[in-house]
Every structure is written in structure tokens, then in C-alpha cells.
Image: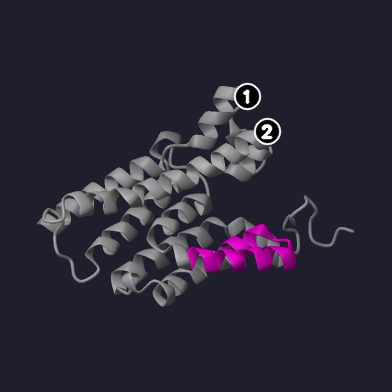
Amino acid sequence: MAILHYTLIFAISSYLLGSIPFGYLLVRIFRGQDVRQTGSGNIGATNVARTGSKGLAIVTLVLDALKGYVAVYHVFFWAGHHPTHLPDAGPHTVYIFASLAALFAIIGHMFPVWLRFKGGKGVATAVGSFLAIAPTAVGVVLVVFIAIVAITRYVSLGSMVSAVLFPFAAWWLNPETNSALVFAFMAACAVLIVARHKDNIRRLLDGNENKLGGRKAGEA
């Protein structure tokens, strides 16, 4: 019962934190617009930039990552201050709950209850969450992301490959995450991120995906 109790606490609190639609709020407050009526209709930093404000896009990116980090850090904070209260779920108990928090923070960003469950793609929130869990793996995956974008100029492709690679990189580089449950939760995060890029995948296959710099594939 204790495990179920803490699972619900961390899942709900992380979902609510992740569901704060910073992109929507910032554009509404400072530009008087609904970011969902622009570009892809997404509430993430990329679409915020399409409203004409790169400053708000940067702030959105930072805040979306920060809410993921805080959701996970909350688990480590609780474990550090109340170690006897956290139920024993195995040798990687803290990381199991931390990866659960990461998953629900990302779900909250993707499906915020405040916006009728229509949110963003979760990449920034995932980066913040993963950074709190396995910083070394994030560093390696970031290098892969930069390399893919530099070669192909497809940010979406870099994001998806990096998301899929992360659970394996964490398992290899951060031994404290070597738990089947931790891997399963992080893999679920990756699957959700790829699924939210379904339109990008279709455009990549059709050769119509936007490249970094604003051009589409095939344009001179």
C-alpha cells in the first residue's frame, strides 16, 4: 500500500507540474495571442518562436525544462529528507520513483488538463527530467543530437533519435539507473516523444520536413 501511495503522490504532483502551459501563458500575457492558433498549434518553444518573439521562446524552453527537472528533483529531495518514509521498491527505489516522476511530467506537458489535453511534444521537459536522473547520459545524447542536426539540419530527427537513445545511454553510463522499471519508464518517455512527432515523421518520409534555417527538404 505504501508503494501505491507514493506512486500516486509522485505521479499526480509531477503531472500537475508538467501540465503548466508556460508557452501558452507567456504568449497570452505578453502578446495577447493564443499560441495554439499559430504554426503547428503546439505550446512548446518552437511554436512560440513562430509568434515572432524569440525571447519568449527561450523563456518557454527554459521553463519547460525546469518543470521536468523540479518534478524529478522533488523525489530526490523527499528521499533525502525522509529516507525512512520512502517505501522499499528494490535497490534502485529512488530512481524508480524519479523516472516515474519524469514520465508523468512529460505526460502533463503533452496532455495538460487545462488545455483540453492538447499540449506540446515534451522534448524540453524530457531534457530537464533526464538531466536530474542521468546527467552523464544526457551529455552524450546531446552530442548525438547536435551531430544529427548538424549533418541533416532536421531538429525533429535529432530529437527523436536522442529520445530513443537516452534509456540505453543511461543504463550504460549511470549504473544507479540499472533497473528494469527505470528503463521501462524512460523507454515509455521515448515512445511518447516519438509518437508526438508523428507529423514530423510523415513529413520526413515525404521529404517535406522543415530544416533548421526555415527551408524544407529539396529547396535550394
Residue 164 visible at all: yes
The part of the image, by quadrant, that contains residue 140 is: bottom right
| Location of mark 2 (residue) | 53
Amino acid at circle 2: Ser
**Image position, residue 87 (x, y; %):** 14, 59
Using the image as rendered, state which of residue 153 and residue 198 is in the foreground. Answer: 153
Q: Which mark is residue 31?
A: 1
At x 25%, y 61%, the residue is 94
At x 58%, y 59%, the residue is 198
| Above/below status of 56 relative to 170 | above
Residue 201 on the magenta span? no
Of all residues, the one furthest to the right in this rendering is 220
At x 60%, y 40%, the residue is 58
- Residue contact between numbered discs 2 and 1, judged by CB atoms under 8 Å: yes
- Range covered by the magenta-colored residues: 137-159
Question: In what element is the residue under mark 1?
Answer: helix
Residue 38 visible at all: no
**Image position, residue 203 (x, y; %):** 69, 60
